[in-house]
Amino acid sequence: MKSTRKAYGEFLSQIGANKDVVVLDADLATATKTDMFLKEYPERHIDVGIAEQDLVGTACGLALSGKTVFASTFAIFMAGRAYDQVRNTAAYSHVNVNLCATHAGVMVGEDGPTHQCIEDVALMNVIPTMKVLSPADDISTKKILGACLKEEGPKYIRLGRSDVEEIYTEDAEFKIGGSNTFGDGTDGTVFAYGPTVGIALNAQKELKEKGINVRVVDLYSIKPVDRDTIIKCAKETDKLVSIEDHSVIGGIGSIISKVLCEEYPKKLEKIGINDTFGKSGNWKVVYEHFGLAKENIISKF
């Protein structure tokens, strides 16, 4: 097991030999794991201090100078405190910058509601030209980041704090605008991304033991979302469920609902944070409190 933030740090170290790569942080290098890059390439790691707006502005300036830039802080600060700079400096100018936000969602646990960013997907999704991605494990993190290197424009990559189960093997493929489907059941589809993919897969196993066959779709590319797969699942399976460590308002459930309304109207049951702030506590307990558990998925079938 490994956290996606640690996988991110390892990825930075792997590509660090490229002298065009520059990594920025805002006084949180140990937490975001950019310290792995710092230890090997200190001359290309910039700590701007507790100044997240400066973080994004400086990152964009370096990117416009031709550098391959990764900028990191917690999701609550990247999507919240630096929103103006993300919108007007990074997105409006279509800067080729990678904004890697760690500690997203209520998975932050003990840090509590002030640091549990449950609205960042909604905030980033609405910004024109912004691409939004969220890997589920170690392998998907590195492959999605690799895909980002080939894609122009601003990218928001949502990463988690805690260790998650390994889901993918090295032969898995990822692309901007893609998704990955597990199983071909027709009783239902569970849409997930990030840490909830593992939860959905565990629910899938238990449902199969009960004779209920569902497929799980990892919508790792939140924007652009894989509309074709959503429509295909709506047509081929009975029940549709989404689960996410994010508000149900403006999250992947809302994004899926929009696609369904436009292309193939069908009911979708959403599991997520229901118009409330998070809670402080062990992240697994907090997940159970908000229904981010396999049992809640199973109850929908």
Image: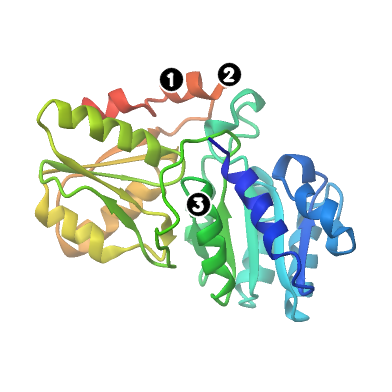
The residue to which callout 3 is attached is 139
Count of labels in the image = 3
Q: Identify the residue at horizontal 84%, vertical 64% (top origin).
A: 44
Single out the residue that lies furthest toward the front: 170
Residue type beneath disc 3: Ile
- The image's colouring method is rainbow
- The relative height of residue 186 versus residue 174 in the rendered view (above or below) is above
**Mark 3 or 1 closer to N-term?**
3
The residue to which callout 2 is attached is 281
- Disc 3/disc 2 C-alpha distance (Å): 28 Å
Residue 72 showing in the rendered view: yes
Circle 2 packing at 10 Å, graded few (<14), some (14-19), many (20+), is some
In the structure shown, which secondary structural element does the residue marked by tag 1 occupy? helix
Q: Quadrant of residue 174?
A: bottom left
**As drawn, is 267 to the left or to the right of 22?**
left
Q: Are marks 2 and 1 in contact (CB under 8 Å)?
A: yes
Residue 300 showing in the rendered view: no
- Disc 3/disc 1 C-alpha distance (Å): 29 Å
**Mark 3 or 2 closer to N-term?**
3
The residue to which callout 1 is attached is 289
User: In the rendering, at what x and y percent does residue 209 appear?
Assistant: 16, 27
- The relative height of residue 52 versus residue 85 in the rendered view (above or below) is above
* Front position in the image: 179 or 255: 179
Q: Identify the residue at horizontal 39%, vertical 58% (top origin).
A: 172
Residue type beneath disc 2: Gly
- Disc 2/disc 1 C-alpha distance (Å): 10 Å
**Mark 2 or 1 closer to N-term?**
2
Q: Are marks 3 and 2 in contact (CB under 8 Å)?
A: no
